[in-house]
Image (cartoon, rainbow, N blue to C red):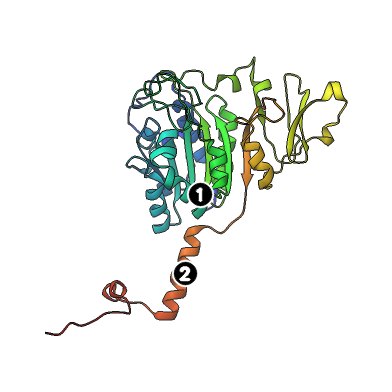
Amino acid sequence: MEASTIDKLTAKDFSSEMEVKWCPGCGDYSILKQVQTVFPDLGVKKEDFVFISGIGCSSRFTYYMDTYGMHSIHGRAAAIASGVKAANPDLSVWVVSGDGDALSIGGNHFIHLMRKNFDLNYLVFNNQIYSLTKGQYSPTSEKGKVTKTSPYGSIEEPFNPSELALGAKATFVARTLDRDPKHMQAMLKRAYAHKGTSFVEVYQNCPVFNDGAFFPFSDKETKKEEAIILEHGMPLIFGNENEKGIMLDGLKPVIVNLNETGISKDNLWIHDERDKTKANLISRFFDTQFNGEDFPRPFGVIYVEDRPVYEEGMANQIKQVTDKKGKMSLNKILSGDKTWSILN
């Protein structure tokens, strides 16, 4: 529906009367604010928004949005959201989950939601820790992380959420962070505009159990060196004076200093958000060293793909079968074609 045909909404229209109960300084406040700020501009009727969450600090989100929603069970938000979208494809469905809820107990549902490609939006608030249960290491905690459940340091390799989503055939993968409101708003709008499952990883600070985990990517003194902003059709450039760039040697990323080498920006890697091979390389920047170099953490749209959405395929299949066989009673559907009568 066109925005002009809908009464103009404001951020306040999406704010419930529930008292927000997150810890002071929690990054969730910023995410809530940006969602409420963006939603009036999407041209969707308020009653057509639905939020589904699992269990965790992030999953309180549904209470604070004045929309329809469900605070569901641990790890099952994706399954419930799929059912909501299948039952009513016209709804704008948003899933809110944390790194533990989405990628641990909900990991199986996460990967299958990505491949099925329902037209919905999946926001994962990643703080690299279990916060609601008071500080255990999570599937995204870095190797060596000391927590209550890893007192001598985690020995596990962490999940890289964007790499996992790409491997599960996601059609939209992006990353943003709580301390960059404008960037987050842009990513939310891009996610909504994508027809298919939009996965957005949001780096979210937990001031109690993992404070400052992502500050290098947002602090004024460090962010230009530690982070790189992805823009479609633009070269991969970073550094305090934009003096560093990334090139490709075959399929091996290489960091070059533009001032020292005289290499032109035109010779750098130009970001193409529809190139999956390169998207996979970008997703691995932060956990893989190429040539012994530490690469900057990428933020923005990593990958986009156009692919038919699940709910439309399901509706078409139902219509084809109905046209061929006609409408059947529930008993007929349940009994199928092969039944027997047992005589005494």
Quarter of the image with the C terminus is: bottom left
**Residue 23 at what x, y percent from top left?**
38, 20
> Dividing the picture into quarters, in which one does residue 63 lie?
top left
Mark yes or no: residue 10 visible: no
Q: Nearer the viewer, residue 233 or 21?
A: 233
- Rendered view: 217 above or below 254: above
Q: Residue 33 placed where, x, y %?
A: 47, 30
4 relative to 29 in the view: left or right:
right
Q: Earlier in the sequence, mark 1 or mark 2?
A: 1
Whether residues under marks 1 and 2 lie with C-beta atoms below 8 angstroms apart, the answer is no
Dot 2 amino acid type: Gln
Looking at the image, residue 295 sits to the left or right of residue 270; the answer is: left
Q: Please, is residue 139 above or below residue 304 in the view?
A: above
Which residue is outermost to the top? 221
Q: Position of residue 253 (x, y in %)?
A: 73, 34
Name the spot of residue 191 as percent of width and height, x first: 55, 43
| Residue found at the very far bottom of the displayed protein | 343
User: Crowding near pointer 2: few (<14 within 10 Å), some, many (20+)?
Assistant: few
Residue assigned mark 1: 114
- Looking at the rendered image, the disc whose residue lies closer to the viewer, 1 or 2, is 1
- Residue drawn at x 57%, y 35% is 175
Mark number displayed over residue 317? 2
What SS does tag 2 mark?
Answer: helix
The answer to whether 280 appears left or right of 269 in the picture is left
Residue 337 in sight from this viewpoint: yes
Query: Residue at image x 15%, y 85%?
Result: 343
At label 1, the amino acid type is Met
In-front residue for pair 191/4:
191
Q: CA distance from mark 1 to mark 2?
A: 20 Å
The residue shown at (73%, 37%) is: 252
Depth check, front residue: 39 or 159: 159
